Every structure is written in C-alpha cells, then in structure tokens.
Image (cartoon, grey):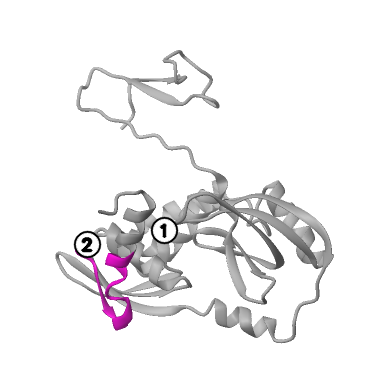
Amino acid sequence: MRPDTIIFMSAEGKEDDPASAEMVRVVTDRPGAELGVELQTPQKWLEVYQTAARMSEMRPDDTDLAEAVQVIAQRILTGVPQRPDSEIGRVLSEAISKRIAVEIEYSRTWKPGLVDRKVHPLRLVETARGWELDALLPDDEVRTFIIDRIRDVALTQDSFEVPRGTTARLVEHRRPTTVDLVVPLGYQWAVDRYAESSTVVEQDEGDVSISAQFLPPVAERVGLVLITAPNAFVIRPDELKEAGRQMADVLLDHHGLQG
C-alpha cells in the first residue's frame, strides 16, 4: 500500500534526513494501514538475491518471483565483490596473498566475550550467510571464522607456508552433509537461512519435506532450523534428531536462563 504521507524522524521524535533517520511515521486517515520499513546492507541484498534465485529455480512457474529476482540483479546488485567490502576484508586479502599470519579479535557465537587468536589465513569464501574466512590455527587445525564477527584484525611479522594437502583438507572441511527434515508450510526460509541449498521433496497442506545441504558446524545449523520452525523435525541422519533440543540448551545457557 502507498501511505498518504511518510515522515522520517530521529530517535528523539524530530523530523530528520532520510539517510540518518531511525524511525518512519505513517500519516494516514486509514487506521488499518501499516507500513514496514527495513534498511538492508548490500551484503544482505546479496543474500536475499541468492535465496530468491534458488527459490525461483524450484518454482519455475512463479513469474512474480522471477521478475523480482531480475529486478534485484539489474537494479541493486552491480557486481559480486571478491572480498568483504571493509577494512577487515582488505587486510585479510593482503595477508592471504602475502602469506602473512594475522591476529584477530573474534566475537564467539554462543559464548560471551571476545577471544584473540593468531591464525594463518588461507582464503575468503562467500556463502549464503555472508563472507567467511578459512584459516589454520597454530596446531594446524582448519577453522572457519565469520567475517561479521571479526572485530579487529592486524598483520603480524610472521610469514607462513601452506602445508601439503591443505587444499584437500579445505574441500573436506566444507563438504556438505545431507539432512532430510520436515518443517511447517511457510518455514522453508528457515532452512534456506542456514543451509547451503535445499530441495523440496514433498509438500502437503501443512508440512514440507526438504532435503538440505549443511556445512559444518552441521548440528548447530540444523538445531537453529529446528528451534526456529515450530514442530520441525529431522528424518535422517539419526544423530541430528536431537539437534534442536541441544541448541535450545546452548541458547538458554548463553542467555543465562538455564534452570
């Protein structure tokens, strides 16, 4: 719907420039009219485009969705960046090309506080959730760090060599796991949010059976789907059937609500 008037306002309730306004006021004589506004970063628009494009492939007869995908591609996305568009992305790209170790300050997902780590950056990978860094820890363990959770990064004076067989290890590290699950109708977006790809196997009036590909940490990602979509459950593999309960326990503990 198009409101009669919209006014951009500051947090203090004063009229403000649209570029910096924190609120939008809708002025209309229709009490039932509502307006939802959400500002998105270019990276978020890229995620929207990737999800919508996958859904369009699965729904070839949905012309409205196909047109929406085309609009995003033509009018909003002007090219896919080769690295995160930030100072952190620039520093990491330099460290990767020069094989220089970096010190990162990282905000962990489920535990409070920041951790400092010295890592050997190997490559930047763009996924449906955003940019990620694959790196080696000092003990030679392959780890993935979400770029949005890196609060600071600094080049060190230490160079490094990539061990033999690292390429194969990275392939194995990012090898997806197939998970068959059922979610309520209308919650397929929850699967697409945490999975790399998904295919609808069967659908009825209430539920959707989906075969999805998840990257590590698989249990955490599947668990997030299960606690997001009401009454969702895993069909196979068996070891992930309790992922939702386990993730719920983690979240309760994280927020200090564990009884």
Q: Earlier in the sequence, mark 2 or mark 1?
A: 1
Q: What amino acid is labelled 2 in the image?
A: Leu
Residue 16 percent location from the top left of the image: 50, 17
Q: Quadrant of residue 165?
A: bottom right
Query: Is residue 172 in the magenta section?
Result: no
Which mark is on residue 66? 1
14, above or below 162, in the image: above
Q: Quadrant of residue 208?
A: bottom left
Taking the spot 33% from the left edge, 25% from the top edge, the residue there is 3
221, above or below 3, in the image: below
Residue 131 percent location from the top left of the image: 59, 59
Query: Is residue 238 in the magenta section?
Result: yes
70, above or below 239, in the image: above
Q: How busy is the neighbourhood of tag 2: few (under 14 within 10 Å), some, or many (20 plus)?
A: some
Q: Is residue 61 visible?
A: no
SS at mark 2 in the image: loop
Nearer to me, 252 or 177: 252
Residue furthest to the front: 259
SS at mark 1 in the image: helix
Q: What amino acid is labelled 1 in the image?
A: Ala
Determine the CA span between mark 2 and mark 1: 21 Å
Q: Quadrant of residue 25?
A: top left
Residue 161 percent location from the top left of the image: 80, 76
Which mark is on residue 185? 2
**First to last magenta residue range:** 231-246
Residue furthest to the top: 14
Taking the spot 43% from the left edge, 71% from the top edge, the residue there is 197
Could you tell whether 156 is left or right of 41 in the image?
A: right
Taking the spot 34% from the left edge, 66% from the top edge, the residue there is 223
Nearer to me, 47 or 64: 47
Q: Is residue 157 visible?
A: yes
Could you tell whether 114 is left or right of 69 in the image?
A: right
